[in-house]
Amino acid sequence: MNEQLTLQATQREETKTVPLRRRKVCLMGTFALFAACALVLLIPHPAYAGVIGDFLDIPNMIKTWLLQIAATLFNTYFGVINQTLDARFISGPFNELFGTTEPYGVIKDFYQAGVIPVAHAILGLFMLMQLIKISQRIDATSTLPAVKDIVFLVVTYCILSYFIDNALDLVSAIYGIFNDLVGNVSDKLQSKNWYEPGIEMTKDDAADATLGGCFLLLIFGLISWVVGLVFYAVSMVVALGRSVQLYVYAAFSPIPISLLGFEETKQIGIGYLKNFAAAALAGVVMVLILYLYPHLVTALAVSGGLGKAEMLGLAQGVETFDSFGVIIKTIAVLITTMMGLVKSGSWAKEILGA
C-alpha cells in the first residue's frame, strides 16, 4: 500500500516537471527570436537589401554567368586562332625546322652512314651497264667506241658522284629558295584585326538579354572554341608533317639523284626533285592561306570584325539572324581555311606539275 502511494506521488511530480520544461524551452525560443529581429534591425538597410536583391534576381544572375562563360570561350577561340595565324612556325632554316638542330643531326648521320654508300653502289651499277652497252656496240660494229661516249660517261660519273656526296646541300638550297619566298610574303602581307580582343560581359549586359539567347550564345561559343582547337591541331599537324616530309626526302636524296644521269631512270630523279620542291612550296601556300583568313572573315562575315556587339545581338534577340550569320560565317571561313591547309601539299604539286 505504501509503495502504491509513493508511485502515485512520483508520477504527480513528473507531471508537474514536464510543463515546466516546456515553458522554459518556449521562453528561450521567444528570446532568441526577439534577439534575431533586433540584430536584423540594427544592420543598415542597403547592406542586406542588395544581397537579398541579387539572390532573388536569379534569372539575371544565370544570364550573367552564361554570358561570361560564352565570352571566355570566344576569347580563348580568338587567342588560339591569332596564335595559329602567326606563320613563323612554318618558316625557318632547313637545319632548324623543329626549332632545334637535333632532328637535322639525326637525318644527316643517317644520310652519311646509310644512304650515300647505297647511292654510290647504284651509280656504279648503272655505270657498269653503260659500259656493257658500249662494248656491245663495239662487238656489233667491230669499231672502237667514239671518244665522245667515253668522255660523256666519265663526266656523268663525276657530276653524279659530286651531287651524291652533296645531295643534302642541294636540297637545302632548293628549300632555301622557297623559304625566302615565305619571308617575303610575311613581310609584305600584314595580318588584319578581325576580332575584338578581351571581350567582357557584365550584369548590365545581361539585363537586356534573354535566357534563350544567352544559351544560344554559349552554344556558339562552345562550337567556336572546339573548332578553333581543331584548327590549331590540324595546322600544327600539317606544318609538322611537312617538316618531317622534307627531312625524309632529304635523308634519301642521294638515291634518286644517282638515277638522274641515265635515260632509263632519270624520270625518277626528276620526279623526286619536283616532289621536294612541291613540299617546300607548300609552306608558301600555307602562309598565304593563313594571311588570307582574316581578310575573308571581314569580307564575308562582318567588316568591323567579330566582337561584343554581334554577341549581344544574338543574346538579346536583336537582329538575331544577322548575329547568327556572322558567327556561322566566321566558323565556315575557319573550316575552309583548315581544308586549305590540308590541301596545301596537293595544291603545291599541281602548281609545279609534280
Image (cartoon, rainbow, N blue to C red):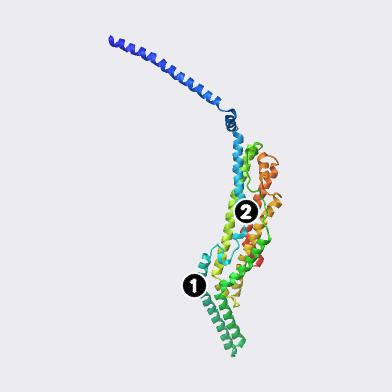
Label tally? 2
- The residue at 46%/20% (across/down) is 28
Residue 342's x, y, as percent? 61, 58
Q: Is residue 36 visible?
A: yes
Q: Secondary structure at mark 1?
A: helix
Quadrant where the N terminus is found in the figure: top left
Give whichever of 5, 120 is nearer the camera.
5
| Relative image position of residue 107 (x, y in whole percent) | 52, 68
Residue 261 appears in which quarter of the rendering? bottom right
- Callout 2–callout 1 Cβ contact below 8 Å: no
Query: Of the numbered discs in the image, which one, if any, rests on residue 82?
Result: 2
**Residue sitting at 55 percent across and 81 percent down?**
127
For badge 1, the amino acid type reads Ala
Badge 2 or badge 1: first in the primary sequence: 2
Q: Quadrant of residue 132?
A: bottom right
Q: Is residue 86 left or right of residue 31?
A: right
Task: Kindly state the secondary structure of the residue where label 2 is placed.
Answer: helix
- For the question of whether residue 146 can be seen, the reply is no
Give the labeled residue for mark 1: 113
